[in-house]
Image: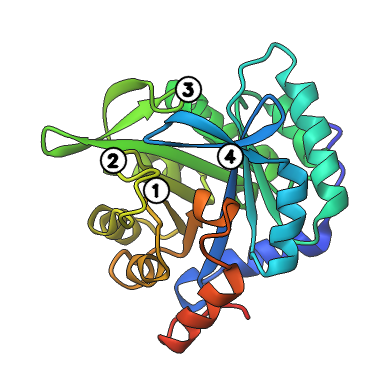
Amino acid sequence: MNFIPQKLLSWFYLFIKNFNHSMLAKRIIPCLDIKDGRTVKGVNFVNLIDAGDPVELGALYSEKGADELVFLDITATHERRKTLAALAKDIAQHLNIPFTIGGGISSLEDVDVLLSSGADKISINSAAVRRPELIDELAKNFGSQFVVVAVDAKLMNGGWYIHLSGGRIPTEIRLLDWVKEAESRGAGEILFTSMNHDGTKNGFANDITARVSESLSIPVIASGGAGAVEHFYDVFTEGKADAGLAASIFHFREIEIRKLKEYLNDMGVTVRL
């Protein structure tokens, strides 16, 4: 591996954030889903519409008080590694906060290139489910603090089940079983998206998020359903999440990050102002 650390201060920040996470400030994380170089947003993983340039949006969120950013490339391409590396370099040049990048990552080489290009963490999803040993390999070679395991799950027939390939392929793997295995293999963080709630703006899946959080000792990022400032308060208190992730409400200026943090602070939730 030719991995060369490039953002030591950001990594130290990430280490502090993940250490004893229950005692630390709750994080607000805008997510940018990227297709063909543009930020897109849909409802329940479909009906995508353009939401702007990812680098410009990322820089804006950095200025507006976001704690971290997540960039997920949902475009299938044979040159994904080259494309994501270029994106990571561009993002790193315009941001001063940590960012995670994911989409189609399936090897040590993919991660080596992205971290060397400036990413602070990488996110893996379907590839980890298909070959769980990938988590062990990444944790061993780069450190658990760089490994985010993203999980897309849907409530079906009374149970929460993992879905792959952007939510298109259902599996028989139960959510709680998988997140526990991911942690045991070296995941440093879980990004849990409720497909039932994604894009609906009716609130996060607080009950199952709390169950996920209580079953793990690593931080949990809640995703799917944010539509009002109260939803973030609920997911931090009822859902016991360590971070709240959202997309369209930030992209389309429905909620300002600073106002959201001021609200949470007034409600007694510890946030970084």
Residue 235 shows which numbered tag?
none
Q: Earlier in the sequence, mark 1 or mark 3?
A: 3
Mark 2: amino acid:
Asn
Mark 1: amino acid:
Gly
Disc nearest the viewer among 4 and 3: 4
| Above or below, comparing residue 237 to residue 219 in the picture | below
Disc nearest the viewer among 1 and 3: 1
Marks 4 and 2 sit apart, C-alpha to C-alpha, by 21 Å
**Tag 1's secondary structure?**
loop
Q: How busy is the neighbourhood of tag 2: few (under 14 within 10 Å), some, or many (20 plus)?
A: some
Q: Nearer the viewer, residue 193 or 175?
A: 193
Q: How busy is the neighbourhood of tag 1: few (under 14 within 10 Å), some, or many (20 plus)?
A: many
Query: Residue 200: x and y, percent?
Result: 34, 46
Q: Is residue 27 visible?
A: yes
Q: Please report contact status of discs 2 and 1: CB closer than 8 Å, yes or no.
A: yes
Mark 4: amino acid:
Ser
Q: Earlier in the sequence, mark 4 or mark 3?
A: 4
Locate residue 85 relative to residue 223 in the image: left or right: right
Residue located at (55% from left, 45% from top) = 148
Marks 2 and 1 sit apart, C-alpha to C-alpha, by 8 Å
Mark 3: amino acid:
Arg
Q: Nearer the viewer, residue 164 or 189?
A: 164
Q: How busy is the neighbourhood of tag 4: few (under 14 within 10 Å), some, or many (20 plus)?
A: many
Locate residue 259 relative to residue 82 in the image: left or right: left
Residue 131 shows which numbered tag?
3
Query: Residue 208: x and y, percent?
Result: 25, 53
The residue carrying mark 1 is: 224
Locate residue 223 relative to residue 108 in the image: left or right: left
The residue carrying mark 2 is: 196
Disc nearest the viewer among 3 and 2: 2
